[in-house]
Amino acid sequence: MDFNGSDTIPGPRAEDQLPHTAQSAVKIVIVGGFGVGKTTMVGSVSEIRPLTTEETMTQAGIGVDDNYGSASKTATTVAMDFGRIKITDELVLYLFGTPGQERFWFLWNGLFEGALGAVVLVDTRRLEVSFDVMGRLEERGVPFVVAVNSFPDAPRYPIADLRAALDLSEMIPIVECDVRRRASSRDVLMTLMRFLHSLAMTGSLT
């Protein structure tokens, strides 16, 4: 590069620039077990080209990572996914997808820092992997909603049964979704924002 000024470092693309009307930005984390669809959700709903840290899965993960229900998965997030969506002209959400493998959970503390709320993605074939995820959010006091991702071969249960199986209080929203569809992913985020608003109105959100 010519440092005499003939060449310049390119700035952000026009579509990646923050809208000039934006007045508030909220950090949201998308969490869940391995292969539940976190990267897919960020990619489907983000209005900018999402940042991903996916790496090809290798033999080293055999016997370490639980890939039940996602045997065809060939890449995995090792740090985070990042995207952005404008909810209104004034409100922008920054989306951070967390790595699913337990051996990368040490990264979660940094990703949770400053998060106003979270989406917990659930696969009904592996409900048990959600308990540690929700426990970590509760320990940090991060409000969350639960989104049941609709996999083609996954069993479907009534919401009341899922609530009981996950041991969730009546106040925590549970919604079904297909994270491959932008509208469905956006609906999940809107459910979270309504939940956070209700908590703020009752003084439960600090």
Image: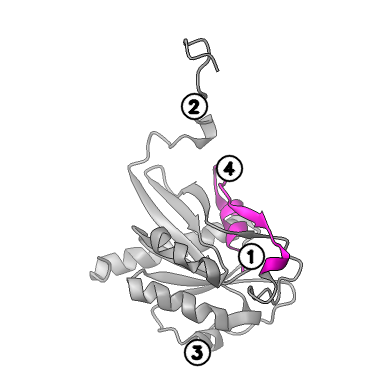
Name the residue nearer the viewer: 2 or 46.
Answer: 2
- Which tag, 3 or 4, sits closer to the chain's start? 4
Part of the protein shown in magenta:
36-60
Real-space Cα separation, disc 4 to disc 1, in angstroms: 20 Å
Other-residue count near label 1 (Cα within 10 Å), few / some / many at <14 / 14–19 / ≥20: some
Q: Tag 4, which secondary structure?
A: loop
Please provide percent x and percent y for residue 119.
Answer: 48, 66
Please provide percent x and percent y for residue 104.
Answer: 52, 65
Amino acid beneath label 3: Ala
Disc 2: which residue: 11
In the picture, the quarter occupied by the C terminus is bottom left
Q: Are marks 4 and 1 in contact (CB under 8 Å)?
A: no
- Which tag, 3 or 2, sits closer to the chain's start? 2
Amino acid beneath label 4: Arg
Q: Is residue 188 above or below residue 174?
A: above
Disc 1: which residue: 178
Please provide percent x and percent y for residue 137.
Answer: 40, 72
Other-residue count near label 2 (Cα within 10 Å), few / some / many at <14 / 14–19 / ≥20: few
Amino acid beneath label 1: Asp
**In the displayed structure image, the side of residue 165 where residue 58 appears, left or right:** right
Real-space Cα separation, disc 4 to disc 2, in angstroms: 15 Å
Q: Tag 1, which secondary structure?
A: loop
Identity of the residue drawn at 38% across and 79% down: 171
Picture disc at residue 164: 3
In the picture, the quarter occupied by the N terminus is top right
Disc 4: which residue: 49
Q: Tag 2, which secondary structure?
A: loop
Q: Nearer the viewer, mark 3 or mark 2?
A: 2
- Which tag, 4 or 2, sits closer to the chain's start? 2
Name the residue nearer the viewer: 81 or 21.
Answer: 81
